[in-house]
Amino acid sequence: MSGIDKTLCEELFAVFARACQERDFELADYLLRGLEALARRENNPSYLDCAYVLFSDSLSADHEAQVHRDSAMDFSFGNECNGPPSPC
C-alpha cells in the first residue's frame, strides 16, 4: 500500500506509534486526541483500543526504564497490539 492509499487515520496512527516508540509522550498525547476526534467523527473507534494499549505500554516501559536505568536490562515494547484491527 503506497502512502497515497492510506487514510488520514492510518497515517495519524503511524505517527502516534512512532511518537510512543520514541517516548515523545507530549506529542503522542496530542496525536491521541486527533485519533479520538476522528473516531468520534467517523463513529469508528477501531484505532482507539490499539492506541490506548500502545500508549499505556509505552508509558509503562518508560517508567520501568527510568526505575532501572542503571541496570543492563533492555526494555522493549511488549504491547499486544500489532496494529489497528480495521481502518477508520
Image (cartoon, rainbow, N blue to C red):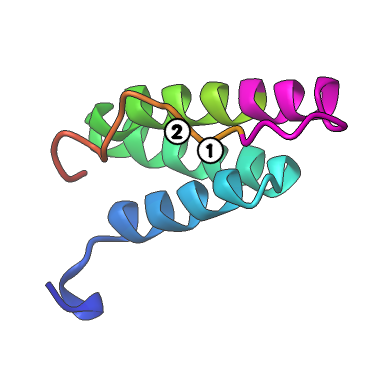
Q: How far apart are marks 1 and 2 (CA)?
A: 6 Å
- Camera-nearest residue between 72 and 77: 72
List the residue tagged with mark 2: 36
Q: Which mark is residue 32?
A: 1
In this rendering, is residue 15 above or below 36?
Answer: below
Q: Quadrant of residue 70?
A: top right
Quick one: label 2, few (<14), some, or many (20+) residues within 10 Å?
some
Q: Is residue 55 magenta?
A: no
Q: Is mark 1 on a helix, strand or loop?
A: helix
Q: Give the vertical position of 55 relative to 88 (above or below).
A: above
Residue 23 in picture, x, y percent from top left? 68, 45
Q: Provide the residue span drawn in magenta.
A: 60-74
Residue 63 sits in which quadrant? top right
What amino acid does circle 1 point to?
Leu
Foreground disc of the pair 1, 2: 1
Answer left or right for 15 relative to 85: right
Q: In this view, does 13 lie above or below 1?
A: above
Q: Residues within 10 Å of mark 1 (few under 14, many from 20)?
A: many
Q: Are marks 1 and 2 in contact (CB under 8 Å)?
A: yes
Question: Is 78 rendered above or below residue 76?
Answer: above
- Determine the residue positioned at 40% across, 26% down: 79
Q: Quadrant of the C terminus?
A: top left
Residue 22 rendering spot, x and y as whole percentages: 64, 52
Q: In which quarter of the image is residue 46?
A: top left
Q: Which of 56 and 69 is in front in this view?
A: 69
Quarter in which the N terminus is drawn: bottom left
Q: Per the image, is 67 magenta?
A: yes
Q: Which residue is drawn at 17% across and 45% down?
A: 87
Position in image of residue 36 (x %, y %): 45, 33
Give the side of residue 78 with respect to residue 67, left or right.
Answer: left
Instruction: Please tell me which residue is depicted at 49% across the width and 34% down the height of the picture.
Output: 77
